[in-house]
Amino acid sequence: MLFNIPFFTLLHNIVSLALGIFGFGFLIFFHELGHFLFAKLFNVLTPSFSIGFGPTLWSKKIGETQFSVSAILIGGYVEIAGNEEIGQGSQAEAHRQDERSITSKPFWQQFLIMIGGILLNLILAFCIFTFLSTRGIPQDPGANLEKSTTKLSFVDPKGPAGLASLKAGDTITALNGAPTHGRVCTLCTLLEGKMNSDVQLTIKRGEQTLIIPVHLIESPKAKGRGHLGVGFSAPALPPQSFLSALGHAWRITGAIAKNTVKAFLGIISGRGLSSVGGPIMILAAMTKGAQQDSATYLLILAIISIGLAIINLVPLPIFDGGQILIFGIEALMGRRLSDRARTILGYACWILVISLFVLLSIKDLYQIITTLNVQTICLFSLLIGVIALIFLTKFIIQRRKS
């Protein structure tokens, strides 16, 4: 036993963590593959294709492209001739202007090359949802308030419900004696006007029926509504025929994409980061999914794939949406933006995004430390140790070679 964790439990958790890391890297690979395939389709040179950052674990030149995988599978890029971006390799072909440069291509081809990663992420999510729909999905990830049940899937330990000792798996059957009929939309109606007040929740917990007092606060998303700090379970989707599964997958993909856009708009409008997870929390979610079963793992993989697609629509130069915007502006101007303007925009956006990355990572670490068990904390400590060891080994090897 290590840290009082049974060996097979520790092994299971390590495998789950490895699957979480692999899934994260796979999504990035799939995204960059979209850019790569469209670049090849339109005969644009791609000198390098890289997944991750930090010490290089594997590198091989295939054809004219140097493929590489680095230690930390967060981020990646395809170097595209004629397009200079901060943090993308040596970029020896960044100022190329011949027929193999992206700058020589019409705007519609530039658009498809840049949107390719987003399209493949959405297609991947759609295919996963189609596959899962043919087998049945334990919980509908695209369910709205009308379809969600009052069974709790998540309880924030620092929220009103968590402080009142509610647990995941509890079902809220009534508020101040008024029945919810098992519907979240009814519960939301009952919570209207009850911010900063004490209420009595009737809870079904297994075979027990409990009445628990809860002090509500105001909802950060709906002004004037009481806030519990919980997540609700969605109804299961039974197995569908292939044609029906296609329709379900389309609806689920659209619903999750819409909710993801709302979450990002919430950041812009100043509603805070409470509903947004950073890379650490994404990895934690994928690891948790891998610990449960293959269907849950694939479900989380699809949801994160949609999130990766949506974030890349942000019109900042380090994202695909920003690159599309720049190419669009250049097409209207009839000339390329100056290198100075591109560099200034690139560095400014990198500073902004890295600041957000650090902020989300701090929030994620705090949530992991305060909400997860000792096993998970040990696993993440082990992961950090492995990454540090990889960096140290790479550094020693480089020093000996020099």
Image (tube, rainbow, N blue to C red):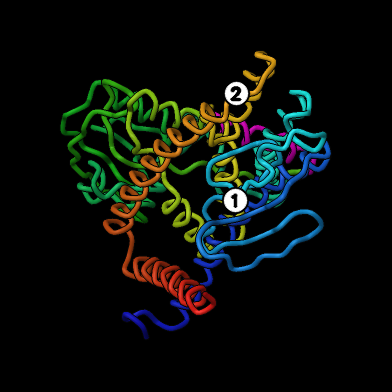
Q: Amino acid at mark 1?
A: Gly
Q: Position of residue 225 (x, y in %)?
A: 28, 24
Q: Is residue 245 above or below residue 21?
A: above
What SS does tag 2 mark? loop
Q: Position of residue 400 (x, y in %)?
A: 50, 79
Residue at coordinates 66% horizontally, 47% vertically from top-left?
A: 92
What SS does tag 1 mark? loop
Residue 272 quadrant: top left
Q: Amino acid at mark 2?
A: Leu
Q: Is residue 182 visible?
A: yes
Q: Which mark is residue 70?
A: none
Q: Earlier in the sequence, mark 1 or mark 2?
A: 1
The magenta stretch is 242-258
Residue of label 2: 337
Label 1 environment density (alpha carbons within 10 Å; few <14, some 14–19, many ≥20): some
Q: Is residue 314 visible?
A: no
Q: Is residue 341 above or below residue 364?
A: above
Residue 236 quadrant: top right
Residue at coordinates 56% horizontally, 44% vertically from top-left?
A: 303
Q: Position of residue 355 (x, y in %)?
A: 36, 41
Which residue is more in the foreground, 159 or 96? 96
Which residue is more in the foreground, 269 or 240? 269
For the N terminus, the image quarter is: bottom left
Residue of label 1: 89
Label 2 environment density (alpha carbons within 10 Å; few <14, some 14–19, many ≥20): few
Q: CA distance from mark 1 to mark 2?
A: 21 Å
Residue at coordinates 47% horizontally, 54% vertically from top-left?
A: 285
